[in-house]
């Protein structure tokens, strides 16, 4: 056998081993993804089955639905129960719409405030800039509930108790430090020459901000908008302390369904139905903004 034939045979064996390793690796990767998908989907499937099963107890809810126990009573409760007879909507619908309005306003407020502060820190030089950035960083070390007493006193002094829309002040203020860093990092990757060229053409700082930088920063703004939209839906602690039952958010309403001490409302299966309905707006926004979420999570860390 000639030397070239030997070399060809050796290369063929090596390429065969490489292909075998790749196939094995691909098999393990797909197996791992299947395991993760099953681990995520099983609880969701169980929630769906529970929400369509009649009764009040979670014990005995099968993973595979039993069509003999199929019922819409939990959804009927959510869409029909009114604690006040003169109410226009059911308690759940009222809480849902109330939370939706807070989430939309919070999203718009956070995007506007954080984009403006990120623009200032990325484009201007001023005294105390580094000190402010360090202060923003330090503020992230303290959770918002540490100031619960102070927040309650402020809300009571200004007459904001039991007014859900004023929760936006807390959500927006808490979102500014972290999101300012993200937007600042993203905007620093946009060349200053764009601003200079626009100013030469007669554009003002306001026009540069709204007509040039905001469209260019759409990815990171979309990521921030999704996070800001999700916050009011998930928050229980602040609304529980600052709102009464007539002005409750959907998180408070759902918690009441799981409180065994509240025998009038306790029904975990109603909670399952409500949790699935709660997931609809969050999932819809995340699906719509998915490309911005994936890109925005890494984009803000390019230049800090």
Image (cartoon, rainbow, N blue to C red):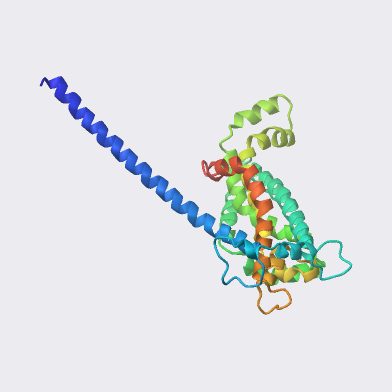
Total numbered circles: 0
Which residue: 41% across, 45% down? 30
Which residue: 75% across, 56% down? 102
Which residue: 71% across, 70% down? 240
Residue 225 appears in view: no
Residue 284 appears in view: yes
Extreme residue toward the front, this view? 68
Of residue 248 and residue 40, the one placed in the foreground of this image is 40
Extreme residue toward the right, this view? 86
Question: Where does residue 257 sit, x and y in percent of width and height?
Answer: 69, 70
Question: Where does residue 163 sit, x and y in percent of width and height?
Answer: 80, 64
Task: Determine which quarter of the picture holds residue 262.
Answer: bottom right
Of residue 55 and residue 184, the one placed in the foreground of this image is 55
Tell me: 41 left or right of 238. Answer: left
Look at the picture and state if 274 lies above or below 259: above
Question: Where does residue 167 sit, x and y in percent of width and height?
Answer: 74, 61
Question: Where does residue 299 sit, x and y in percent of width and height?
Answer: 54, 41
In the picture, the quarter occupied by the N terminus is: top left
Look at the picture and state if 107 lies above or below 269: above
């Amino acid at each position: 056998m000639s030397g070239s034939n030997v070399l060809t045979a050796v290369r063929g064996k090596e390429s065969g081993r490489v292909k075998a390793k790749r196939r094995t690796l691909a098999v393990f990767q797909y197996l791992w993804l299947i395991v993760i998908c099953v681990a995520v989907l099983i609880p969701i499937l169980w929630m769906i089955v529970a929400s369509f099963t009649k009764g009040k107890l979670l014990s005995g809810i099968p993973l595979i639905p039993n069509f003999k126990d199929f019922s819409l009573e939990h959804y009927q409760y959510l869409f029909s129960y009114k604690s006040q007879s003169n109410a226009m909507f059911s308690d759940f619908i009222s809480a849902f719409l109330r939370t939706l309005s807070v989430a939309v306003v919070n999203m718009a407020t956070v995007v506007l405030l954080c984009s403006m502060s990120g623009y200032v820190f990325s484009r201007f030089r001023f005294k105390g800039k580094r000190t402010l950035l360090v202060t923003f960083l330090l503020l992230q070390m303290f959770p918002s509930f540490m100031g619960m007493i102070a927040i309650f006193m402020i809300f009571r002094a200004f007459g904001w108790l039991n007014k859900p829309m004023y929760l936006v002040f807390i959500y927006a203020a808490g979102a500014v430090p972290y999101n300012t860093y993200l937007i600042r990092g993203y905007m620093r990757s946009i060349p200053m020459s764009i601003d200079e060229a626009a100013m030469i053409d007669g554009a003002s700082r306001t026009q540069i901000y709204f007509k040039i930088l905001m469209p260019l920063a759409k990815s990171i703004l979309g990521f921030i908008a999704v996070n800001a939209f999700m916050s009011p839906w998930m928050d229980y602690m602040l609304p529980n302390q600052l709102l009464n039952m007539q002005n409750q958010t959907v998180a408070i309403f759902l918690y009441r369904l799981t409180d065994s001490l509240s025998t009038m409302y306790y029904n975990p299966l109603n909670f399952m139905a409500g949790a699935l309905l709660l997931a609809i707006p969050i999932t819809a926004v995340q699906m719509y903004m998915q490309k911005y979420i994936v890109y925005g999570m890494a984009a803000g860390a390019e230049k800090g």
